Amino acid sequence: MRVVHYLNQFFAGIGGEDKASTLPASRDGAVGPGRKLAAALAAEGHELVATVYCGDDYAASARNAATEILGLVQEAGAERFALLDVDAAAAMEVPTAVIVAALSPLGWGKLTASGADMVSA
């Protein structure tokens, strides 16, 4: 299964509050804490193909942030979109539409905070 992981700008290694306006972007493979997630997924036969990231301020305030983020997820050919967990995503100010998409029954899923347990939507 091809998985794309979402991180905010801090966990993606872009910067702190000074980079909170970072536009949505992606990198191939795992980034930052996603490396441990990638190892857990690989042990189960899955591949973390990309990491999508965005600045907290941009994600919270731009009307089109969710559409941009989901567009990057789709471009990477994701079969699952991984958020560490919904509470963590909310704390990172991930747009509600992204959380809903990640948990919808349309082929999306979420990963628990441990990064090892797949939970069906």
Image (cartoon, rainbow, N blue to C red):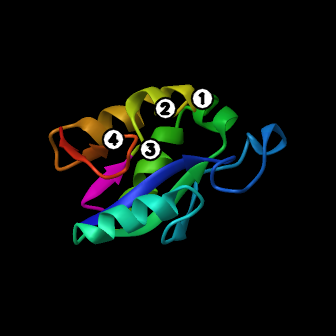
The residue tagged 2 is 88
The residue tagged 3 is 67
Q: Which mark is drawn over residue 19?
A: none
Span shown in magenta: 78-82
The residue sitting at 49% across, 32% down in the picture is 88
Depth check, front residue: 62 or 73: 73
Amino acid marked by disc 3: Thr
Relative to 67, is 37 above or below? Answer: below
The residue sitting at 44% across, 44% down in the picture is 67
- Quarter of the image with the C terminus is top left
Residue 59: quadrant of the picture: top right
The residue sitting at 57% across, 52% down in the picture is 53
CA separation, marks 1 and 4? 23 Å
Q: Position of residue 45 (x, y in %)?
A: 22, 72
Q: Which mark is drawn over residue 60?
A: 1
Look at the numbered disc 2 and give the secondary structure of its residue: helix
